[in-house]
Amino acid sequence: AKDKLDKDAAEINVELRSLRERKNNIPVRQLDVRALLCRELRVADDELPFAGELIAVRPQESDWEGAAERLLHSFALSVLVPEDHYRAVSDWIDGHHLRERVVYYRVPAQALAGRVRPGDYGPDTLAAKLEVKDTPFASWLEQELASRADVQCVESMADFRRASRAITQAGQIKGGVRHEKDDRFRIDDRSRYVLGWSNERKIDVLLAKAAELAAQLARAEEVRAGHDAAVKAAFVRGQLLARLAETHEFAAID
């Protein structure tokens, strides 16, 4: 149990050190792969951004943040590759064993030039609760979100059943006949959030987790120390009993 806690604490410490050196919420393992890619291709990180670095939930819509993370988590961890870098990036990825899952999107040159018209979506959809960072990728991302996040944000299950595409604040997603609710992790577990260009709240959550792990490690160390003491005491008793077994004279035993 202590070994598992040590491993969890080490992972959180690595993530915290990385978060303090940047502003986004992308996990450090994905960032390491991109860093290697950019270093070997001599490309700046911001030329190959993760989608999640450029998408955020509007502050006034924070009640829907967990639902947005559920819907867009995989897309947020995708790398956006401009047309100019597409050939080099695709060759590099194919030629390396990355030990991670990597998804990337080829972004056409006309999208980067702002010649792609953003898609349409209703005011009550999740897409309307999102904002896109002002970068050359903005128009392409807005078009993608108009498709991916064009789901009605519903307050009741009756509305959920009536809508063709919908999402609840609890994270249940409906797309036609397909329904999904992934509760492997808590919907308010901010340590897993990947959207946005500010990570201050994620750092606060991880610091709290680190403090709790430290307390658990202290308790585990007390238990381990108790077991060590019991083992040593048993060893000493074993030695004494072995010596007693060597003699049958009462005076020696006494």
Image (tube, helix red, strand yellow):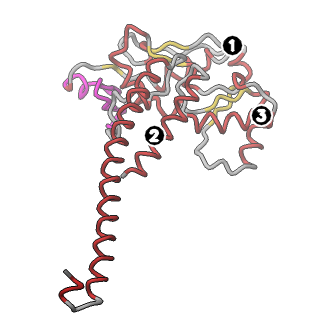
Q: Can you give x and y, in whole percent of width and height, for residue 248 in the image?
A: 22, 92
Quadrant of the drawing holding the C terminus: bottom left
Q: Residue at x 29, y 25 (%)?
A: 168
Question: Is residue 179 visible in the rendered structure shown here?
Answer: no
Disc 2 + disc 1, Cβ < 8 Å: no
Q: Is residue 152 above or below residue 6?
A: above
Q: Residues within 10 Å of mark 2 (few under 14, many from 20)?
A: some
The residue under label 2 is 9
Q: Earlier in the sequence, mark 2 or mark 1?
A: 2
Q: Can you give x and y, in whole percent of width and height, for residue 212 in the image?
A: 35, 33
The residue under label 3 is 39
**What's the residue type where badge 2 is placed?**
Ala
Asked which quadrant contains residue 27, the reply is: top right
Rounded to the nearest angstrom, the CA distance separating label 2 from label 1 is 47 Å
Choose mark 2 or mark 1, whichever is in front.
Answer: 2
The residue under label 1 is 115
Q: Residues within 10 Å of mark 3 (few under 14, many from 20)?
A: few
Rounded to the nearest angstrom, the CA distance separating label 3 from label 2 is 29 Å
Q: Which residues are magenta?
A: 158-181
Question: Is residue 231 visible in the rendered structure shown here?
Answer: yes
Q: Earlier in the sequence, mark 3 or mark 2?
A: 2
Rounded to the nearest angstrom, the CA distance separating label 1 from label 3 is 30 Å
**What's the residue type where badge 1 is placed?**
Arg
Closest to the observer, 164 or 130:
130
